[in-house]
Image: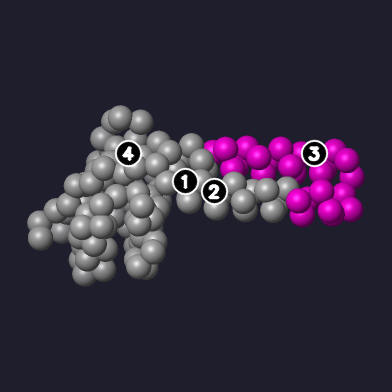
């Protein structure tokens, strides 16, 4: 197996889990005995971080990965080359691919759930991440 290319689809389960976690955090903030301004600022911060995370999940639409741990991720229609970094992990129901673009200073993460790509593509990605 030399490389794998897959199209990444929208996952309602991933967005739903993210929004449920944000709603639970907002509920905890409402229950905490904080000053009004601190509570409002904290709730706005949680909302903005949830919106940012949803945008990050929805912006990735393709992935190419090869044996030499080179990766290309299609973000908003543009392919961005990079390398797989330490910290990627594989579970049967979740794959977290940690990568850094060629011009980037920070690592990024692409989360893959079973419904986001074909079963064969996900299997190949898991094999490449686990054994390379």
Mark yes or no: residue 10 visible. yes
The crowding category of the residue bearing disc 2, from other C-alpha atoms within 10 Å (few below 14, some 14 to 19, many at least 20), is few
For the residues marked 2 and 4, what is the alpha-carbon distance in whole angstroms? 18 Å
Q: Which mark is residue 16?
A: 2
Is 132 included in the stretch rendered in magenta?
Answer: no
**Region in magenta:** 27-52
| Residue lying at 77% horizontally and 54% vertically, measured from the top left | 28
In this rendering, the label closer to the viewer, 2 or 4 = 2
| Residue lying at 82% horizontally and 43% vertically, measured from the top left | 38
Label whose residue precedes the other's in the sequence (4 or 1): 1
Circle 3 residue: 40
**In this image, 40 relative to 95: left or right?**
right
**In this image, 79 relative to 98: left or right?**
left
The crowding category of the residue bearing disc 3, from other C-alpha atoms within 10 Å (few below 14, some 14 to 19, many at least 20), is some
User: Badges 3 and 4: C-beta atoms under 8 Å apart?
Assistant: no
Label whose residue precedes the other's in the sequence (3 or 4): 3
Q: Which mark is residue 61?
A: 4
For the residues marked 3 and 2, what is the alpha-carbon distance in whole angstroms? 23 Å
Label whose residue precedes the other's in the sequence (2 or 4): 2
User: Badges 2 and 1: C-beta atoms under 8 Å apart?
Assistant: yes
Circle 1 residue: 12
**In this image, 38 relative to 23: left or right?**
right
For the residues marked 4 and 1, what is the alpha-carbon distance in whole angstroms? 14 Å
> Tag 2's secondary structure?
helix
């Amino acid at each position: 197996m030399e490389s794998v290319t897959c199209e990444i689809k929208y996952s309602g389960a991933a967005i739903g889990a993210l929004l449920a976690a944000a709603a639970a955090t907002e509920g905890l903030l409402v229950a905490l005995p904080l000053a009004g301004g601190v509570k409002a600022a904290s709730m706005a911060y949680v909302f903005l971080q949830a919106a940012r995370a949803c945008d990050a999940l929805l912006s990735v639409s393709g992935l190419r990965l090869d044996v030499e741990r080179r990766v290309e991720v299609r973000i908003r229609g543009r392919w961005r080359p990079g390398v797989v970094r330490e910290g990627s992990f594989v579970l049967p129901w979740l794959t977290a691919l940690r990568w850094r673009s060629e011009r980037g200073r920070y690592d990024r993460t692409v989360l893959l759930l079973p419904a986001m790509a074909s079963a064969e593509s996900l299997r190949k990605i898991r094999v490449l991440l686990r054994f390379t």
